[in-house]
Image (tube, rainbow, N blue to C red):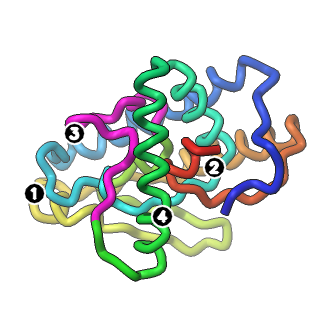
Amino acid sequence: MHTSRPLITIENPEWINRIALLFKKMDRSYAEASEAGEFSCTGCQENCCLSLFYHHTLLELLYLREGLNSLSEETLNTVTFRAQEAVPRLHRRAEDETLEKIPCPLMEEGQCLLYTHRPMVCRLHGVAHFLERPDGSVLKGPGCSRYEETAADNRPLNRTPLYKEMAHLEKTLRQETGFTDRLKLTIAEMILL
C-alpha cells in the first residue's frame, strides 16, 4: 500500500542517529543469537534477499531513503530500474500467482548495497525468536530452515525489547512529523516512493 500523500522528510537530523542506534542494538542481538547457535547464514539457498517481506514503519522507510541518498547517480538508477522490474513480480507473488524468487533490488553480487540501512526484518530474520505481545501471548518463530538444520544451540532471540523500542520511536516520529498513513511496503516499493 502506498502512502496517500507525498513522503515527508525528517526535519530533525537527530532521528537518523536514533534509528541507527536502534538498528545497531538489533545487529548485536542477532549476532549474539547466531553466535550462541554457531549459525551462519552465508551460502544459503533460501536467501532472505529473495523473500517477500513487507516493512511497516516510517523509521525503516526514512532510514532506507537516507541510504539511497548516499548512492551514486548511476547506482541509484540501476537500483531504481530493478525496483521497477520487481514490483509487478512481487505483486504476483503476493497474490500467490507465482512462487518465483525475486531478488531484492539492493542485492549486488550476493551483497546488500545498503547493508547498514537495511530494514528490521533484514536484520533479524533467520534465527529462532520469540515476541511477548502486549496481551500476554507469546509468538515464537523457529528460524529459517538452515538455522533449524545447523544451529548447535537453540536459544531464541527475544525480539520484545527491540520491538518495544522501535514502536516507541515510531510513535514519537509520527507525532513529531504528523505522518499518520499506514505502511505496507516492499523494499522495491520503498525505493520507488
Amino acid residing under circle 2: Lys
Q: Residues within 10 Å of mark 2 (few under 14, many from 20)?
A: some
Q: Residue 105: horizontal and vertical position, in percent?
A: 39, 44
SS assignment for the magenta stretch, majority: loop
Are the residues at dot 4 and dot 2 in contact (C-beta closer than 8 Å)?
Answer: no
The disc, 4 or 2, on the residue closer to the chain's N-terminal end is 4
The residue located at (37%, 67%) in the rendering is 141
Residue 29 higher or lower than 98, as above or below: above
State which mark lies toward you, 4 or 3: 4
Distance of mark 4 from mark 3, alpha carbons?
Answer: 22 Å
Instruction: Confirm whether residue 24 shows in the render.
Output: no
Q: Which residue is mark 2?
A: 164
In the rendered image, residue 115 lying in the magenta stretch gets the answer yes
The residue located at (56%, 74%) in the rendering is 137
Q: Which residue is mark 1?
A: 150
SS type, badge 4? helix
Quarter of the N terminus within the rendering:
bottom right
Q: Which residue is mark 3?
A: 110
